[in-house]
Structures are given as structure tokens and as C-alpha cells.
Image (spheres, coloured by chain):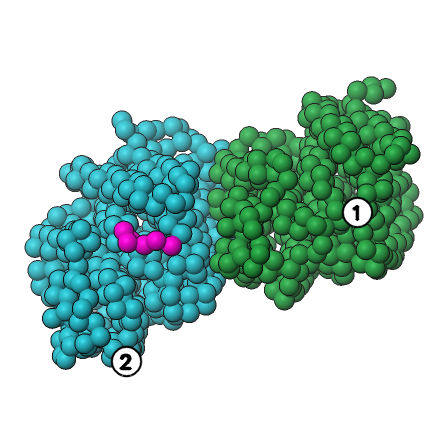
Chain colours: A green, B cyan
Amino acid sequence: MNWMIFSPEICCLATALVFLFLSMAPVDSRRDYIVAIALTGVAVCASLAGIHAQGELFHGTYRIDLFSQVFKSMLLMGLFLVVVISSGLNGIERRYHPEFYMLLTICTLALMMLVSAVHILTLYVALELSSYSLYILVFLRKGRDQGTSSGMKFFLIGASASATMLFGLALLYGATNAAYFRVLIEVIPGVIHQPEVILGLALALCGFFFKMAVFPFHFWAPDVYEGAAHQVAAYISTASKVAVIAVLLRMAALTGGASTHLVHFLAILAIISMTVGNLTAIAQKDLKRLLAFSSIAHAGYVLVGILCISPQGNTSAIFYALTVLLLKFTCFLVVVQVAFDGENIEIDRLAGLHRRSPIMALALMTALFGLAGIPPTIGFTGKLLIFTAAMEKGYFALVLIAMFNVVISLYYYLLVVRAAYLLEPAEGEGALAPMPGAGILAGTLVAAIVAIGIYPTPILELIRAAAMALG
Amino acid sequence: MHTEFADFPFLSAILLSCLVGMLVIMVLPAQRTREIKWVSAVFSGLTLILSAYLFLAYDQAQGGLQFVERLPWIPGLGISYHNGADGFSLPMLLLTGIVFFTGVLTMWEMEHRVKEFFALIFLLVAGVFGMFMALDLFFIFVWFDVSLFPMYLLIAVWGSTRKEYAAMKLTLYLLAGSALILPAIVYLVVQSGIGTFDILALMAPGTFSPGEQKFAFLLLYIGFGILAGVWPFHTWSPVGHVAAPTAVSMIHAGVLMKIGAFGVLRVGMFLCPEGWQFWAPLMALLATVGIVYGAFVGLSQKDLKYCIGYSSVSHMGIVGLGLATMTVDGINGAVFQMFAHGVMTALFFSSVGYIYDRTHTKIIAELGGLGRIMPVATTYFIIAALTGIGVPCLASFWAELLVFISSFKVYPVYGILAISGLVVSALFMLRVVQRTCYGPKNEKFAHLPDVPFKLGIPRMILVSVIVLFGLFPSLMLDVIRTATIPFLHRLP
């Protein structure tokens, strides 16, 4: 067995163990922060170095190919970025800081296992491991009430989604007598018209729809985003989403596109998700809640790519995972800088950001325009890929509905841009003092968002190859 | 897909002057407003020189696309960076150069958040230039959107009169247009079956069935038509004109609305000629309604900028009518009208801008007797009004003449209605001139200075362009004809 191909996971596990020991030592936030940056940086390098690794582990239940490695790189980059903005970490009590890093890395480890899992049980175990780490992370929010109530909501909805999913997996196993994906992919297209198979697949997908915040499993999202610490919310909206996109792609690939019922099911969920997400976002006053509803809408757009069940559709969904990662993280970077005290942030609190910190205002505007899919940002390229894939399948109406949702979403994104660029700073609000390196990070992200939007070719080629590995 | 470059990539040089200009402005400190304005003037002047050079250097005998630049961009999707100029785009490039340069000069006195203003203007104009020269659907859409979203901030931050409402309405309307354009573009690319975004490749006859063309053309016509101010999708336009600051009004009415008409021409009519022929009667109908409606609504306006806004709706209707005639003269006239209206409306807004900056009012009833207070400013204003009416020897006379003659042949009823609309619009223009420039002097404004020579420069440039092309219309028509005749020859 070649353990080198497992090195990103090992790095992650080692980091978690380091923080387990640090949590027993006297509290020193500065030390934790530096250690976390160093170790997650190493993990990112390990994953990038091993991006072309291939192989199978643990009796074929764990597959390592370009598809999984691209996702792992994205996940670790997401982890790294979230760690970078944790230098203040005022939303979580100081004595819990080592635990925060530990749970974050464990969750990332679980998500990495999730994207490599090709056996029903590995999949379920990885999903639960990541979910439980996230439940605790949400609870860690300082000021007990918020964290507890949203944590409870998250936990209860999550547990019921897991149960639903387990039921679906059991049905699937019962109908096919197979637990390995490589067997399922051969068996399922033949038996896809049996009701229990369709039901099993649909229920199994529900567990992931919960994590993805697809309608009707989206109710936790706004409360959790609002109730969790900014860094945790940033993690949930970036890394966790990325992993789920990977799993949904694997699950959808199982059907081989043989079931129109399943496609219709996904299409309906996609349409409702984007419409509900966008319409509800308009009424939001809290920036994190707004971002939560926009996540729900984006889950809908991704589903459009996933339900194509074609190489183009898979490429577009993987590209969109990267898009969501970059854009949502940039938004949260600004949230963390503006609400450095760890309190929740009303949209009005962005007033005068263009004067208080021009680079943060620019980053926020670029990210929001990116989320709205306006060129020349990565957001536009992502949407173009999804729409092209859907159009090739002949889903014209779906594309048109998605496009009109984009217009609706532009309204509330513009309201945020308006606060940042039009309103003058409130009395006594001086220049914003971003934490060290935040300005450079924001500039880099803006450059990346625009550069990949203008010239996506190299990354697109890599992602296309990754999508082929899935097939 | 091959790489192809002219000896010197003039078209890319125009784009680069905009983008480099924007970057230079962004790195200058915000308080150095003088330097920022000079940088803007230099780089916008550069685009004017380049676009004027292209206009003159174009080989009319050879015709077709020239100055072509092509570079594979996203090979996996069949997207290439493909630019070229022909008789349709050259007048538009020249127009953009003129309006951009004069617009920058017009804003010489502004003091509020200067750096951001000029940076956004440069981004917007880069989008406009890019749209006029692009021959790849991907880039056409990208540049189209790049030219739209800076408008939100430009109007909402620096505007007046219900600026936030106007900015939001405008942005959502135009983006709703692009919500129709993008599916249409993707639909065409997918249906072609050759997996390319390149217009020249997609133009090959027989690529699309008549049914596909009819469907896609309708989406493209409405999508781009929203930006072109086609009735009944025009309501964003007067509101936006009124709220925008002077230079933005100039660029907005002068070139941005032309992007819409140009999009109908370049994407809709080039790729879906049969769809165009099918829907042409509808285009003619909507255009005629726009001409008449714009004129009548303009008649009852109290705000000077609203008057010009509705006259724009009316004049853009003439463009639409010209395109709908499907004749050489009609299309020549439409493209010429796009150019003439762009210059005229820029002059209009820049003179109204001057008057507004001094008097702080745009209400017609409050003005009056300006002719004796600021004779030079009113002269510019009157020249713009006369151009709008279509007085001979001024550029738009020829454009309107061509459109009306050809529309009489094809759609006699619409032609007569459109001419009557023009009479009404002449009436309302003259009324506006009479009420603001003549009559009793408003003593409140008696002390205000006239246009100084330095601020007069941009207006003088615009007037000389109007007169030049009014006296020598063949300068423009010969270029446009090189594109129109081959285009109509290709039709089935």
C-alpha cells in the first residue's frame, strides 16, 4: 500500500493531533494561530504536490484520482484561508481556540475522506464525522444563546437528514446488493426503473442536500450562518459546500443519466432553491443571513450543472465549486475585517467602507458582482459553463429561469454594494485597521477572481481532466 | 483555430489605452485630482486618435473586416479573442472615441471622488470599445456587461434627481436584457453543433434552421433592444439620463444605447438573418411607436434632461426603423443615425450640463432668457436641438432622410407616422429652445458666466463633427456602405 498518496489526509490528521495536545497546554492564541497557519500550509503543499496521485486504499473503499485530489486541494485551500482570517477570532472564547483549530482540521479530514469515498459505509462515516465537528464548531460561538440555539437547530435538522440518508442507502443496498460504487454504477442503470432504487437514491441524496442547503433542507442555513462565529460560517459556506458538490457528482454519476425521474426531481429542487434563496435574501438586513440565502440560491445553480450528468456538466459543477470557494471566502474576509469584534454585522454597518478601507470595499464589490455572475469575474465563467452544459442537454427553460434568478440576485447584491460605496461612514467610524496581511490577501483574491474569469483555460483544462476521472 | 494579428494591433491598443488608463488612475493618490484629469484626458485622447486613424486608414476598396486580431482563448469551449473592424463598427468606434474624449473634458470641473469616477468611466468605455470590435460571442457578452455595471455606481454616487432609484432601475433593466442575451447566445452556440463562439464561423449559411433563427432573434432583439431604448422597454432610459452626471449622460445616451442597436445588428441580424426578416415588421412597428411616443411624451416634460431623454427614445426609434427596412439605404441610414445621434446627444447633455452646473436647475420654467446671459452656451444648445430636428447641413439630416425614404418604400404607413412623429419632436425641441434661451431673463441667473474657452473645447469638437459630417455625409456613408452591401448580398 502506497501511503504517500494518503499524505494530505495524514497532514490534516497530524495537525488535529497537534492541536489536541496544544489544547492541554496553557492558552496562547498567537502560538495557535502561527502553528495552524504553518501546518495547514504544509497540508496545502502536500495536496498540490500529490494532485496527480492515483490509487486505491482500504480494500478499494477509498479511491484517489484526479477528481478527488482536485477537490482535496480546494478543501485544504479553503481550510488554509479560513485559518488565515482567524487571527482575531473574537467570536470564540480564547480558551477554546485550540479546539477550534482541531475541529476545523478534523472536519476537513472528514470532507477529504468524503470526496474519496467509493463505498456506502465510508461515505456515511465521513459525512457523520464532518457533521459532528461542524455541530460543535457552531456551538463554540461566544455569547451562549446565539450559538446554542442555532447549533441545536443545525444538529436536529442534520440528524434527521442523516437518518433519511441512511434509510435511502439501506434501500439502495437492498435493491442492488452492492455497496461499492464501482459495482453500483454497473447495476443501477439496469434497475433504475424500480421504485425502491429511485426512492433510495433520492433519499440518499437528501443527506447531502442538507449540507448543501438545498430546498427543502435549507432552514438551518440562515440561523447557523448568523449564529456561528464568522470563521465557522466562512468554513461552512466554502469548504463544506465544495465537498458536497463532489459527493453529489459521484452519486449522480451512479445513475449514468438513465433516470429522467431523478433529473426532474433535481431540476425542481434546483429551481425552487434558487428562487426561494434569492427572493428571501432580498428581505435580509444581516449580511451573514444574506450570504446564507445566496448560498441556497447558488446550491440551485450547482444542481443545474450536476443534473446534466455529462462531462460538461461535471466540469461546470467542479468549476463552480472553485467559484463558490473564492467568492464566498472573499465576502467573509470582508465580514471578519469589518466586524472584527466578532459581533454580527448588519448591512448598514458597511456604510462608508469605500472610505474606511478602499481595498476591502473593492474586494466586497468584486466578490458580490462575481456571485451575481457578472463578467469578467470567475462567477460569470462558472455560470456560462453550467448554462452551456444544460443547454447541450436541451434544458432551455432551466437556463432561462436561472438567468432570471441571476437578475433578482443582482438586486440584493447591489444593495450591499450601495451600503459600501454610497453611504458615508457613521459618526466616529474612522479608517478600518485590517489585520496584518488582510489587504494583500484581499488584493490577491480580487486578482484571482478577475484573472480566472478572464483567462480560465489552464484551470479549466485541469478540471476537465478531473471530470473525466470521475466518469 | 489560428492566431492572426495585423502588423500593429490597433484595436487591442484602443482597449489597452482604456485599461492602462484605468490602472494609472487607480494607482494615483485620490487627492491629486489635477493629475488624474490629465491622465484621463491623455488616455481618452489616445483612444480618439487611434479610432480616428482606423476610420481613415480603412481600405474601402477592399472592404470587409480589417485590422483583424485573433488568438485562441479558451480552446476547450471554442472561444477566441477575435477582433475586427468593418463598415458597421468603424463609425461606432469613432463615435466612442469622440464622446469619451469630450466627456472627460466636460467633467474638468468636478471635485467629488474624482479618482473613482474616472476609473469607472474608463472601465465602462473599455467595455463599449470591446463590444464594438469583438467578433466572438463570449467577448461580446463580456464587454456588454462590463459596460453596464459601472453605470450603477456612476449614477448612484455622482448623479442627481432620484439617483439611487434610477441607478437600480437601469441596472436591473439592462441586466434583465442580458438574461435574455446569454441564453440566446448559448442556444445558438449549442445548436450550431460546431462548438465555437466565433461569429464568422457561425455566420455560414445553413448553420441554423429558420425556426432556430426566429426564436433566437426574438430573444436577442428584446435583450439588446432594452439597451437600445426600444419601446416599450425604454422606461429606464429617460430616468437614467436625468439622474446621471453630465459625462455619464453623454456616454450613456451617446454610445451605450448604440451598443444595444449594434448588438441587434452584429449578433441578431448577422447570425439570424431569417429571424430578422421574419420579425422585421414587429421591429418597424415598435420603432414607429417609439418615434411617435417619444416625441409626444417629450412635449409634456418640464425637466430639460427628461426632454432630451425622450428625444433619445424617439431618435433610437429611427435607428430601429432603418434596420427593419432591410434595404441598403435603410441600414446605412440607421448606422449613420447611430453616429449622428451619439454626437448630437453628447452635445445636448454637455450644454445642459453646463447650464445645470451654473443654475442648479433643469426645470424649463425656471430658466429663460439664457440667450442673453450665456450666449455661447445657448448656441451649443441650439445647434444640438437643430441637429435633433434634422436640419440640413447637420449630420442627422442625412441619416433621417435615408431612413425615411427607405421606410416609405417598405412600410408606407409607418413611414408617414414616423415623419409626423418627427414634426412633433421638432415642435417640442423648438419649444424647449424658445422657453429656455429666449423670453424674459431670469434675474436670479443674470450674473452667471458664459462658457469659458477651455470648457468650450469639447463642445466645439462635437459641433465641428456634426457640421463636418453634415456637409460631407459621403465621408461616413462610403465606409458604412462597404459593410451594408455585402451583408445584404448574403441574404437568402
Q: Do the residues labelled 1 and 2 touch (CB within 8 Å)?
A: no
> Label 1 sits on what residue type?
Ile
Q: Name the residue under label 1.
A: A92
User: Would you identify the image quadrant in which residue A35 lies?
Assistant: top right
Q: Does the magenta stretch include residue B99?
A: no
Residue A294 placed where, x, y %?
A: 64, 56
Residue A411 placed where, x, y %?
A: 54, 61
User: Mark 1 against mark 2, which lies toward the viewer?
Assistant: 1
For label 2, the SS is loop
User: Would you identify the image quadrant in which residue B173 lies?
Assistant: bottom left
* Near-viewer residue (B428 or A193): B428
> Label 2 sits on what residue type?
Ser
* Near-viewer residue (A419 or A352): A352
For residue B115, above or below residue A274: above
* Near-viewer residue (A401 or B240): B240
Question: Residue, x 89% and y 28% (percent of image)?
Answer: A59
Range covered by the magenta-colored residues: B107-112
Q: Tell whether B326 sits left or right of A312.
A: left
Residue A444 placed where, x, y %?
A: 56, 35
For residue A414, above or below residue B294: above
Q: Name the residue under label 2.
A: B300
Q: Please report, as a chain letter, where disc 2 is located.
A: B
For label 1, the SS is loop
User: Would you identify the image quadrant in which residue B379 lies?
Assistant: bottom left
